[in-house]
Amino acid sequence: MVQQIGTRCDLIMFGALGDLAQRKLFPALYQLECARLLARETRILALARSEVDTDGARKRLASRIRQHVREDELDEEVLAGFLERVDYLCFDFGDEAGYAPLNEWRRRGGGELIVYMATPPSLYGMIARNLKTGGCCNESTRVVVEKPIGHDLESSRVINDQLAEVFNENQLFRIDHYLGKETVQNLIALRFANNLFATQWNQNHISHVEITVAESVGIEGRWGYFDKAGQMRDMIQNHLLQLLCLIAMDPPSDLSADSIRDEKVKVLKALRPITQDLMETHLVRGQYTAGTSDGKPVPGYLEEEDAYKGSSTETFVALKAEIHNWRWSGVPFYIRTGKRLPEKLSQIIIHFKPAPHYIFDPDQKHLANNKLIIRLQPDEGMSLQILTKDQGLDKGMRLRQGPLELTFSEAFNAQRIPDAYERLLWEIMKGNQYLFVRRDEVEYAWRWVDQVISNWEDHAASPKRYASGTWGPVASIAMITRDGRSWYEDV
Ligand code: NDP
């Protein structure tokens, strides 16, 4: 028999037949099975409201796994073995009596208990209380919760307080799935394993940083949910601020969860508030109108199904963030994220300052700064744009900009890059919290985002329109052009 190397776990999944669980979590668990990372005794208890038996639930999960795993990665025998691990129970999570069978199930196993709450965050507190009352958890239980933790500082505190009534902080794994991406992990390796970059990573050598997270899709049937949140709460408060923290943080003293998270919190605390007087120069909100996506006509945000025609929710944000500390003084971080942009793309660009004295053709001076491009998707990888001499006798000392390229799929012999959720689930099973967000990180991020939102509400400007299939409102280009720069669009 082939050895499985993972730790033995009992995983209880609340909301196991929901979108996230079926589209991401079960396919990720299946991949861990394929990679032999699930211990032989590991069991999964799927919980949801649908009235099906274990067999029915397994069939549903199998069909969704087949749908979301690439054909060449699908092994029916492994899948059948994986589904054997899954039991299913149907009950309403508000019903205290429904929790008794969880203890029964636990008694038959005995691995580390992991509780995954793949439910709306409004249920986290109730589920935690019911687990405690039912005697279904203890001080070693690991608890996984999804974003968003609240929709502002106050509501996030309520959720965090409810969880803290039952669990200690070191039991809580708050997911931001961006932290599970290979390239995001590589940011830590790049910065802290290469002295070449470590010495350059500050305001002496870096002129500015760009972070773009673009989606080509629109609202995808989630209008009601999205309209209450908007792009600022849905993307910037979590994913983009996490990326910013990983780029900007000081070197941690070690790789422990708290060392890394302490450094991230310092960055969040040092973010300059975007006050009323900075609204015009530091922030652009947009909302998409009709246009094209992949060559097909698509409706505007206000014409989507279920849309409220008067909504002023933003589907695009561009902002200029400043970090008030020695390392980053005078280095703006231009951040933009939006829906219905020309393509699905996530990338970070570190723009280095030009050499202090320039001696080449004056007409090539605009080339004279190195860029480090970190691609999160598509084609995870990194490329360092450097200048060399152009080849050929006729070129003289003409410069040429070219990449030192590391595309992970090529560099690592086309090994598949694990999905973020595979890594996150694997780290949870090992009990490692460094890829998860601590309470104070969530709250400092909300504090900053809340003040931006409250200022724009006072400012009373509606979001600027942009046609679907474009890079957002013209004002976002003007924002960066005013500083003598432009968005990097060589993609
Ligand atoms: P869904 O609504 O699709 O799934 C939630 C699941 O919980 C459903 O199976 C639902 O059952 C079940 N549920 C809700 N209330 C109860 C209850 N009282 N008793 C029993 N079961 C209940 O949500 P998602 O899967 O989309 O999201 C889950 C979490 O993950 C949320 O916190 C979300 O913010 C987060 N998230 C989701 C992402 C995604 O891509 N979907 C991405 C990032 C985060 P029923 O079907 O019967 O209503």
Image (cartoon, helix red, strand yellow):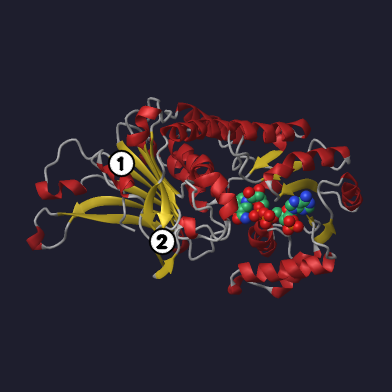
Q: In x, y percent, where is residue 3? A: 74, 61
Horizontal placement of 170 versus 227: left or right? right
Q: CA distance from mark 1 to mark 2?
A: 24 Å
Disc 1 secondary structure class: helix
Residue drawn at x 61%, y 68% as measured from the top left: 69
Point 78% across, 67% down: residue: 58
User: Where in the figure is residue 402, as x and y percent of width and height?
Assistant: 26, 56
Quarter of the picture containing the C terminus is bottom left
* Position of 224 relative to 335 (above/below): below
Which residue corresponds to mark 2?
Answer: 290
Q: Which of marks 2 and 1 precedes in the sequence?
A: 2
Residue type for callout 2: Ala
The quadrant in which residue 220 appears is bottom right
Mark 1 neighbour density, 10 Å: few (under 14) some (14–19) many (20 or more): many
199 and 455: which one is in front? 455
Name the image quarter holding residue 259: top right
Residue 302 position, x and y percent, is 48, 55
Q: Quadrant of residue 296?
A: bottom left
Nearest to the observer: residue 130 or residue 141? 130
Residue at image x 49%, y 66%? 414
Mark number displayed over residue 479: 1
- Would you say 195 lies left or right of 144 here? left
At label 1, the amino acid type is: Met
Q: Of circles 1 and 2, which is in front?
A: 2
Residue, far front: 310
Element assignment for label 2? loop
